[in-house]
Amino acid sequence: MLVSHSARLAQGAAELAAQMAPGVLLLPAGGTDDGSLGTSYDVVSTAVDGGLVGTDGVVVLADLGSAVMTIESVIELDDSLEGRVVLADAPFVEGAVAAAVTAHGGGSLAEVLASAEAAGSTFAQSAAGAGGGFVPAAGPADQLAGAAGIEDDSPGAPRAVTLRNPLGLHARPAAILARLVAGYDAKVTINGVNAASVLEMMKLGATGGRELVIAAEGRQANEARDAALAAVEGGFGEV
Protein backbone atom coordinates (compact mmCIF):
# COMPACT_ATOMS: atom_id res chain seq x y z
CA MET A 1 0.00 0.00 0.00
CA LEU A 2 1.31 3.45 -0.97
CA VAL A 3 0.37 6.35 1.28
CA SER A 4 1.14 9.75 -0.18
CA HIS A 5 0.09 13.35 0.22
CA SER A 6 -0.76 13.31 -3.47
CA ALA A 7 -3.33 10.98 -4.99
CA ARG A 8 -1.54 11.25 -8.33
CA LEU A 9 1.82 10.37 -6.79
CA ALA A 10 0.40 7.31 -5.04
CA GLN A 11 -1.39 6.19 -8.21
CA GLY A 12 1.68 6.75 -10.36
CA ALA A 13 3.96 4.80 -8.04
CA ALA A 14 1.43 1.96 -7.96
CA GLU A 15 1.22 1.92 -11.77
CA LEU A 16 5.02 1.83 -12.06
CA ALA A 17 5.34 -1.04 -9.58
CA ALA A 18 2.51 -2.89 -11.35
CA GLN A 19 4.57 -2.87 -14.55
CA MET A 20 7.32 -4.70 -12.68
CA ALA A 21 5.00 -7.11 -10.86
CA PRO A 22 1.72 -7.72 -12.72
CA GLY A 23 -0.97 -9.33 -10.64
CA VAL A 24 0.29 -8.05 -7.28
CA LEU A 25 -2.30 -6.13 -5.26
CA LEU A 26 -1.08 -2.51 -5.12
CA LEU A 27 -3.20 -0.02 -3.24
CA PRO A 28 -2.66 3.73 -3.70
CA ALA A 29 -3.93 5.74 -0.73
CA GLY A 30 -3.10 9.32 -1.58
CA GLY A 31 -4.60 12.68 -0.83
CA THR A 32 -7.48 13.74 1.37
CA ASP A 33 -11.12 12.67 1.17
CA ASP A 34 -11.81 15.32 -1.49
CA GLY A 35 -8.63 14.62 -3.45
CA SER A 36 -6.68 17.58 -2.15
CA LEU A 37 -3.07 17.39 -1.06
CA GLY A 38 -2.67 15.81 2.35
CA THR A 39 -3.46 12.51 4.03
CA SER A 40 -6.70 11.08 5.31
CA TYR A 41 -7.31 8.58 8.09
CA ASP A 42 -10.41 7.30 6.28
CA VAL A 43 -8.64 6.90 2.92
CA VAL A 44 -5.79 4.96 4.54
CA SER A 45 -8.09 2.87 6.74
CA THR A 46 -10.26 1.90 3.75
CA ALA A 47 -7.17 0.87 1.76
CA VAL A 48 -5.90 -1.22 4.68
CA ASP A 49 -9.24 -3.04 4.92
CA GLY A 50 -9.12 -3.79 1.20
CA GLY A 51 -5.54 -4.99 1.38
CA LEU A 52 -6.27 -7.50 4.11
CA VAL A 53 -8.96 -9.32 2.15
CA GLY A 54 -7.54 -12.71 1.23
CA THR A 55 -3.93 -11.82 2.06
CA ASP A 56 -1.45 -12.53 4.84
CA GLY A 57 -0.89 -8.85 5.47
CA VAL A 58 -0.05 -5.45 4.03
CA VAL A 59 3.30 -3.71 3.65
CA VAL A 60 2.87 0.06 3.68
CA LEU A 61 5.17 2.73 2.24
CA ALA A 62 4.70 6.41 3.03
CA ASP A 63 6.13 9.47 1.33
CA LEU A 64 6.46 12.10 4.09
CA GLY A 65 6.21 12.49 7.86
CA SER A 66 2.49 13.10 8.26
CA ALA A 67 1.72 10.16 5.99
CA VAL A 68 3.73 8.03 8.41
CA MET A 69 1.73 9.47 11.30
CA THR A 70 -1.55 8.68 9.57
CA ILE A 71 -0.74 5.02 8.94
CA GLU A 72 0.65 4.67 12.47
CA SER A 73 -2.63 6.04 13.83
CA VAL A 74 -4.63 3.52 11.80
CA ILE A 75 -2.51 0.65 13.14
CA GLU A 76 -2.49 1.84 16.76
CA LEU A 77 -6.26 2.30 16.95
CA ASP A 78 -7.05 -1.25 15.79
CA ASP A 79 -5.35 -4.03 17.76
CA SER A 80 -6.31 -6.58 15.09
CA LEU A 81 -3.87 -4.94 12.66
CA GLU A 82 -0.77 -5.57 14.76
CA GLY A 83 1.63 -7.80 12.84
CA ARG A 84 -0.65 -7.81 9.80
CA VAL A 85 -0.04 -4.25 8.63
CA VAL A 86 3.61 -3.21 8.68
CA LEU A 87 5.18 0.13 7.83
CA ALA A 88 8.39 -0.02 5.81
CA ASP A 89 11.27 2.36 6.44
CA ALA A 90 12.00 2.59 2.74
CA PRO A 91 12.20 5.01 -0.20
CA PHE A 92 8.77 5.46 -1.70
CA VAL A 93 9.33 4.49 -5.34
CA GLU A 94 12.33 2.16 -5.08
CA GLY A 95 10.79 0.41 -2.09
CA ALA A 96 7.48 -0.04 -3.87
CA VAL A 97 9.11 -1.66 -6.89
CA ALA A 98 11.31 -3.95 -4.78
CA ALA A 99 8.42 -5.00 -2.54
CA ALA A 100 6.10 -5.65 -5.48
CA VAL A 101 8.60 -7.89 -7.27
CA THR A 102 9.25 -9.86 -4.07
CA ALA A 103 5.51 -10.27 -3.51
CA HIS A 104 5.12 -11.44 -7.11
CA GLY A 105 7.70 -14.13 -6.40
CA GLY A 106 5.63 -15.44 -3.50
CA GLY A 107 7.55 -13.72 -0.71
CA SER A 108 6.14 -13.70 2.79
CA LEU A 109 5.05 -10.52 4.56
CA ALA A 110 8.43 -10.36 6.31
CA GLU A 111 10.31 -10.93 3.05
CA VAL A 112 8.36 -8.24 1.22
CA LEU A 113 9.03 -5.81 4.08
CA ALA A 114 12.73 -6.66 4.09
CA SER A 115 12.94 -6.20 0.33
CA ALA A 116 11.39 -2.74 0.52
CA GLU A 117 13.74 -1.67 3.29
CA ALA A 118 16.79 -3.11 1.54
CA ALA A 119 15.97 -0.88 -1.43
CA GLY A 120 16.94 2.08 0.72
CA SER A 121 20.45 0.80 1.34
CA THR A 122 20.85 -0.19 -2.30
CA PHE A 123 19.90 3.32 -3.40
CA ALA A 124 22.29 4.90 -0.91
CA GLN A 125 25.19 2.68 -1.93
CA SER A 126 24.60 3.46 -5.59
CA ALA A 127 24.61 7.20 -4.93
CA ALA A 128 27.70 7.00 -2.74
CA GLY A 129 29.59 4.93 -5.28
CA ALA A 130 28.72 7.26 -8.11
CA GLY A 131 30.56 10.21 -6.57
CA GLY A 132 28.32 12.69 -8.32
CA GLY A 133 27.89 10.75 -11.54
CA PHE A 134 26.71 7.28 -12.45
CA VAL A 135 29.43 4.64 -12.66
CA PRO A 136 28.47 1.14 -13.90
CA ALA A 137 29.34 -1.65 -11.52
CA ALA A 138 32.65 -3.37 -12.21
CA GLY A 139 35.26 -5.43 -10.42
CA PRO A 140 34.20 -8.96 -9.41
CA ALA A 141 31.69 -9.09 -12.24
CA ASP A 142 34.37 -8.42 -14.83
CA GLN A 143 36.58 -11.07 -13.27
CA LEU A 144 33.72 -13.53 -13.61
CA ALA A 145 33.43 -12.68 -17.27
CA GLY A 146 36.96 -13.93 -17.82
CA ALA A 147 36.19 -17.18 -16.06
CA ALA A 148 32.94 -17.73 -17.93
CA GLY A 149 34.69 -19.12 -20.98
CA ILE A 150 36.40 -21.86 -18.97
CA GLU A 151 34.63 -25.19 -19.20
CA ASP A 152 33.02 -25.79 -15.83
CA ASP A 153 30.32 -28.41 -15.37
CA SER A 154 29.68 -27.75 -11.69
CA PRO A 155 26.03 -26.92 -10.82
CA GLY A 156 25.18 -23.35 -11.72
CA ALA A 157 28.68 -22.59 -13.03
CA PRO A 158 29.07 -19.13 -14.66
CA ARG A 159 27.98 -18.75 -18.26
CA ALA A 160 28.35 -15.63 -20.39
CA VAL A 161 25.66 -14.15 -22.63
CA THR A 162 25.47 -10.92 -24.62
CA LEU A 163 22.70 -8.49 -23.73
CA ARG A 164 20.80 -7.90 -26.97
CA ASN A 165 18.37 -5.20 -25.85
CA PRO A 166 19.32 -1.78 -27.30
CA LEU A 167 18.15 -0.07 -24.09
CA GLY A 168 20.09 -2.51 -21.93
CA LEU A 169 19.03 -4.03 -18.65
CA HIS A 170 16.44 -1.40 -17.80
CA ALA A 171 13.47 -1.76 -15.46
CA ARG A 172 11.28 -4.07 -17.55
CA PRO A 173 13.83 -6.80 -18.37
CA ALA A 174 15.29 -6.53 -14.87
CA ALA A 175 11.84 -7.19 -13.43
CA ILE A 176 11.29 -10.12 -15.80
CA LEU A 177 14.56 -11.68 -14.65
CA ALA A 178 13.79 -11.09 -10.98
CA ARG A 179 10.37 -12.72 -11.29
CA LEU A 180 11.83 -15.58 -13.31
CA VAL A 181 14.58 -16.55 -10.87
CA ALA A 182 12.22 -16.24 -7.91
CA GLY A 183 10.46 -19.34 -9.19
CA TYR A 184 13.51 -21.57 -8.64
CA ASP A 185 15.08 -23.03 -5.55
CA ALA A 186 18.37 -21.30 -6.28
CA LYS A 187 20.25 -18.06 -5.79
CA VAL A 188 21.14 -16.51 -9.14
CA THR A 189 23.67 -13.75 -9.73
CA ILE A 190 24.22 -11.60 -12.79
CA ASN A 191 27.63 -9.97 -12.99
CA GLY A 192 27.98 -10.62 -9.30
CA VAL A 193 24.72 -9.03 -8.11
CA ASN A 194 21.56 -10.66 -6.85
CA ALA A 195 19.29 -11.38 -9.83
CA ALA A 196 16.24 -11.38 -7.54
CA SER A 197 16.73 -7.64 -6.97
CA VAL A 198 15.48 -5.33 -9.73
CA LEU A 199 17.39 -2.41 -8.26
CA GLU A 200 20.68 -4.31 -7.99
CA MET A 201 20.47 -5.33 -11.64
CA MET A 202 19.55 -1.85 -12.84
CA LYS A 203 22.49 -0.47 -10.86
CA LEU A 204 24.83 -2.46 -13.12
CA GLY A 205 24.15 0.03 -15.88
CA ALA A 206 24.36 -2.81 -18.40
CA THR A 207 23.86 -1.45 -21.93
CA GLY A 208 23.04 -3.29 -25.13
CA GLY A 209 25.96 -5.39 -26.36
CA ARG A 210 27.47 -5.86 -22.91
CA GLU A 211 28.38 -9.33 -21.73
CA LEU A 212 26.48 -10.63 -18.72
CA VAL A 213 27.78 -13.49 -16.61
CA ILE A 214 25.06 -15.57 -15.01
CA ALA A 215 25.74 -18.06 -12.22
CA ALA A 216 23.62 -19.86 -9.65
CA GLU A 217 23.80 -22.04 -6.58
CA GLY A 218 21.21 -24.21 -4.90
CA ARG A 219 19.10 -27.25 -5.61
CA GLN A 220 17.91 -25.94 -9.00
CA ALA A 221 21.08 -24.05 -9.89
CA ASN A 222 21.38 -25.30 -13.47
CA GLU A 223 17.70 -24.83 -14.24
CA ALA A 224 17.63 -21.29 -12.84
CA ARG A 225 20.84 -20.25 -14.60
CA ASP A 226 19.73 -21.70 -17.93
CA ALA A 227 16.31 -20.04 -17.68
CA ALA A 228 17.97 -16.67 -17.06
CA LEU A 229 20.36 -17.24 -19.97
CA ALA A 230 17.45 -18.07 -22.27
CA ALA A 231 15.58 -14.93 -21.19
CA VAL A 232 18.58 -12.73 -22.00
CA GLU A 233 19.22 -14.51 -25.30
CA GLY A 234 15.55 -14.06 -26.19
CA GLY A 235 15.79 -10.30 -25.73
CA PHE A 236 12.81 -10.22 -23.33
CA GLY A 237 10.47 -9.81 -26.29
CA GLU A 238 12.01 -6.45 -27.19
CA VAL A 239 14.26 -7.55 -30.06
Image: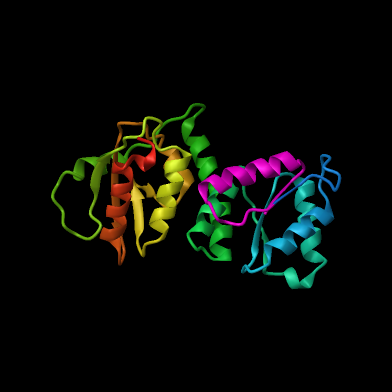
Q: Position of residue 133 (x, y in %)?
A: 49, 26
Q: Residue furthest top?
A: 133
Q: Residue furthest right?
A: 34
Q: Position of residue 66 (x, y in %)?
A: 80, 47
Occupied quadrant, residue 217: bottom left
Residue at 14% over, 47% down: 150
Query: In the picture, which quadrant includes the C terminus?
Result: top left
- Do we see residue 91 in this rendering? no
Residue at 74% over, 64% down: 49
Q: Which residues are magenta?
A: 1-27
Answer above or below: position of 136 versus 68: above
Answer above or below: position of 80 versus 15: below
Q: Position of residue 106 (x, y in %)?
A: 50, 63
Answer above or below: position of 116 versus 184: above
Occupied quadrant, residue 187: bottom left
Query: In the picture, which quadrant includes the N terminus?
Result: bottom right
- Do we see residue 53 in this rendering? yes
Q: Residue furthest left?
A: 151
> How many marks on residues?
0
Q: Position of residue 25 (x, y in %)?
A: 61, 57
Residue at 84% over, 40% down: 36
Query: In the image, is 136 to the left or to the right of 210?
Result: right
Query: In the image, is 168 to the left or to the right of 90?
Result: left
The one nearer the camera, 162 or 63, is 162
Query: In the image, is 233 to the left or to the right of 33?
Result: left
